Image (cartoon, rainbow, N blue to C red):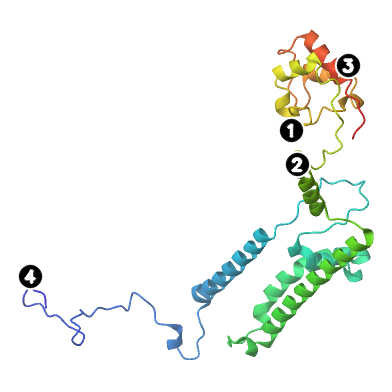
Amino acid sequence: MAHKQDPNEKVVFIGDSRVRKRDYSNVAPPDYSAYPGKSEAFIPNFLLKEWMVGVVVLVGFLVLVIAEPAPLGYPANPLNSSFIPMPDWYFLFLYQMLKYPYTSGDYLVLGVLGLSGLPFISLLLAPFLDTGKERRFYRRPIASSLMIVSLVAVTYLTWVSWDHYQYELEVNGVTPEHIERKIKAEEAVKKGLPRPIPGREKIAAMVNADDPAFETMKQAQCIACHGAELEGANGPTLRGVGDILNKDELVATITNGKGDGMPPFKDTLSAEKIDQIATWLSTQKAEAK
């Protein structure tokens, strides 16, 4: 025993361990099992466990989403009649359910609102449908049955939706956009060409690229928005702009600007240079490739 300042102080030891006995009654509450017939406290014990399980499931789902990202297609084109719409893989089961007669057509509102509200309604009713204190899943028939049916339904609907999508591609002879983009990129790399930019394969060729007006546009920093070859970098392409605007409209746009993106150049360029640029741009009427 260590010496203290007060040699008469009484020290109580636990056995031979020479560990001072302390009172922990106010530090940790007794476990719920110490009370016969009582279940675990919902807050915070049970709720914390549920949250931890939810976090593990969410992290696992996010890992799957990152590992299998949704493919990137071409820009939307309402004139593309061969396009087969397809949602992200984790929405396939909902997409398939909306194809059935009782969730589409005259029942579209019921299908959309019912499908989105059913999971929340089930969660709200779960505590009232399953009031037992049993924790083992095989002794909780209602909760276990709902969970198993939900998992089987989601798996089955996802498989059916994907299988039908593959069937549509085969019947219509359509190559998915992300596969087509990959093939075109690989072909361009093999030929020593830059990767094609989706949506800009049909941009018209630039006419009279050696015109002095083009050099004036470079000095005015027009290429910062319209691209080094006027193909459209951070702004709209100017190739083929002569098919959209005439010379007078081009002069007005360059002089006074347009909207928030196009600044006015009346204080930067002279009237002669603006006319020179507008004249040259009005000739950009080549047919799209």
Mark 3 neighbour density, 10 Å: few (under 14) some (14–19) many (20 or more): few
The residue tagged with tag 3: helix, strand or loop? helix
In front: label 1 or label 2: 2
In front: label 3 or label 2: 2
Say which residue label 4 marks.
5
Instruction: Name the residue nearer the viewer: 50 or 207.
Output: 207
Instruction: Measure how far apart labels 1 and 3 are at the Cα level.
Output: 25 Å
Going by the numbered disc 4, the residue's amino acid type is Gln
Query: Which residue is located at x 90 percent, y 71 percent?
Result: 102
Instruction: Name the residue nearer the viewer: 180 or 190.
Output: 190
Give the left or right position of residue 138, taking residue 51 as reference.
Answer: right
Query: Which residue is located at x 69 percent, y 77 percent?
Result: 125
Say which residue label 3 marks.
248
Residue furthest front in the image: 191
The residue tagged with tag 2: helix, strand or loop? loop
| Occupied quadrant, residue 215 | top right
Say which residue label 1 marks.
233
Say which residue label 2 marks.
195
In the displayed structure, 148 sits above or below 261; it is: below
Instruction: Measure how far apart labels 1 and 2 are at the Cα level.
Output: 15 Å
Going by the numbered disc 2, the residue's amino acid type is Arg
